[in-house]
Each structure stands twice: as C-alpha cells, then as structure tokens.
Amino acid sequence: MVSWFAKGAEGEKFVEEQEEKRKSAGGNDNVRNWRFKLGYDSSGYIVPLDDLTFFFNEHQFQANGSYYNYETCIQDVEGECPLCENGNRFAPVGVMSIIDLTEYKKKDGTMSKPKKKIMVLKQGGRERWLKRQKKLGGLAFKKFEVTRSRDKKGEATGTMEDYEKEVDPEILKQLAPSDVDANEWLKPYNYEELFMPKSAAELRKLIGISEPVGSSESGGDYQEPEKKSIKDLI
C-alpha cells in the first residue's frame, strides 16, 4: 500500500512530486472529484487519453449533506464492506482519463478552458464506450461529441456519443495550462493510486457508524491484564 506521508529528505522529495502531480492534474487538490458530467439536455466535447481498461466496484452515497461521495467497494478485498452493510449498493464502473474541451461561460463571465478529468462510466455508458473502443480500434486521442438527454435518469456522463476525428497529441499539448507540463498533462491518471480503497475502519468513520463490538478500534470486550504481585513475577 502506498504510504500517505513521508519524513525528512524523503518528505521534501515527496512534497515536490505531489505538487507536480497536482499541477499536472490542472491544479485541483481533489482529483477524484474531477469527474466529467453534463447537465440535462446538453452536449460537450472530449478527447480520451487512454482506452477503457480499468474496472472496479464503486459506491456513491450521501454524507456531510452531499450525495456526491464516492468510495471503492472493499467487499472483495477485506471480505466485508461497511458501505455494503449500511445498505449502499455498489456499481461496477470503468474509468478513463479525458481532456474536456466543452466550452461554457463561467459565473465570472470568462469562458472555460480545456481540463483534464476522470470519466467514470456505469453500465449503459460502459457498454457503449466499449463497443466504440472495439469498433474504432481504441479511444485514445479521438474527439467525441457527447450528449445527455432530458431524461433525468440518464447517466450524467452522457447518453449518446458521436465520433468526430483523430486528434494530434502535439496540437492537444498546446491547450495545456501554462503552469503544467504538457507531456504529463496528456498522461492517463494512475487509477490504482487514485481509487485506492480505504480500510473498513476508515469507511465506518466516514459514514458515521461504530466499529463492531470486540474490534480493536471499538474497544469492546477489552479486558485489563490481570495484575500480578511482585512475588508472582519474580
């Protein structure tokens, strides 16, 4: 498991590496939440940076007043998953890295710029994109127009996609933010790190449920060791 901290000289190197990763992601500190989504009855343009080859089970759940919380299911990893036990159903998903080329006017009146994002696809979208991938011989560096219907139950990643053309990576690099390495910007995310599952204890704390009685974290059934006299010890 990758450590989440480092000390001393290694710590200095760690900070530099993480800062570069943050910048390469476009400056967002929480890359996992940089998910591509469309509004109802709207369209956008994307360019995948890799093929759809990474799959896992993911939970979406409500916490801290928001329904947009996502965590990797650990049922097959630890044999138990607090989110499953709490009644939160998981969904098999596939992920790929994309450059979102969708243009729109922001609240401050400026136009949006291309951003590197994660596209998390559930059943309908996953199946459609896998068919596209097979038909086109891959998805990387191909431009697509994606559309979301008016159906509120339709996937936020889009309900239809149309292939437009191949995109030259060198041209795409010119759209990278000025403060990031363009070559790194076009590299797919490291999904094993990005979606590394939390432990059962961490998930329980996240959704506010207590540890099972008897677990070391709960302190249940803990018995103070029997105190012996000096005569018994020596």
Image (cartoon, grey):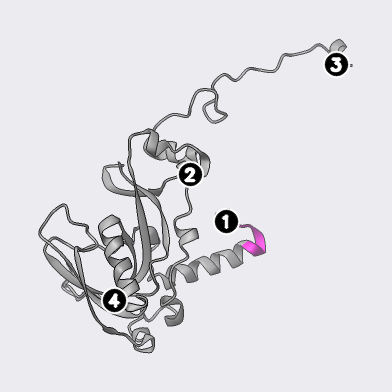
Label 3 amino acid? Leu
Q: In the rendered image of this protein, does residue 7 appear above or below residue 222?
A: below
Left or right of 51, for residue 39: left
Q: Do the residues labelled 1 and 4 touch (CB within 8 Å)?
A: no
Q: Where is residue 107 in the image (x, y as percent from the top left)?
A: 17, 67
19 or 81: nearer the eye? 81
Residue type at mark 2 is Asp
User: Of label 4 and label 3, which has the lower sequence position?
Assistant: 4
Q: Nearer the viewer, mark 1 or mark 3?
A: 1
Query: Which SS class for mark 2?
Result: helix
Q: Residue 76 carries which label?
A: 2
Q: How crowded is mark 1: few (under 14 residues within 10 Å), some or many (20 or more)?
A: few
Q: Distance between the residues labelled 4 and 3?
A: 71 Å
Residue wearing tag 1: 2
Closer-to-camera residue (140/105): 140
In primary-sequence order, the first of circles 1 and 4 is: 1
- The location of residue 115, given as percent across then percent down, is 31, 73
Q: Residue at x 22, y 59 (%)?
A: 156
Q: Is residue 17 left or right of residue 150?
A: right
Residue type at numbered disc 4: Pro
Q: Distance between the residues labelled 2 and 1?
A: 19 Å
Image-quadrant location for residue 120 = bottom left
**In terms of sequence position, does the residue under pointer 2 or pointer 1 come before the other?**
1
Name the residue furthest right: 234
User: CA gap, disc 1 to disc 4?
Assistant: 30 Å
Circle 2/circle 4 CB separation < 8 Å? no
- Residue 233 badge: 3
Tag on residue 114? Answer: 4
Q: Which of marks 2 and 3 is nearer the N terminus?
A: 2
Highlighted range, magenta: 4-10
105 is within the stretch colored magenta: no
Secondary structure beneath dot 3 equals helix
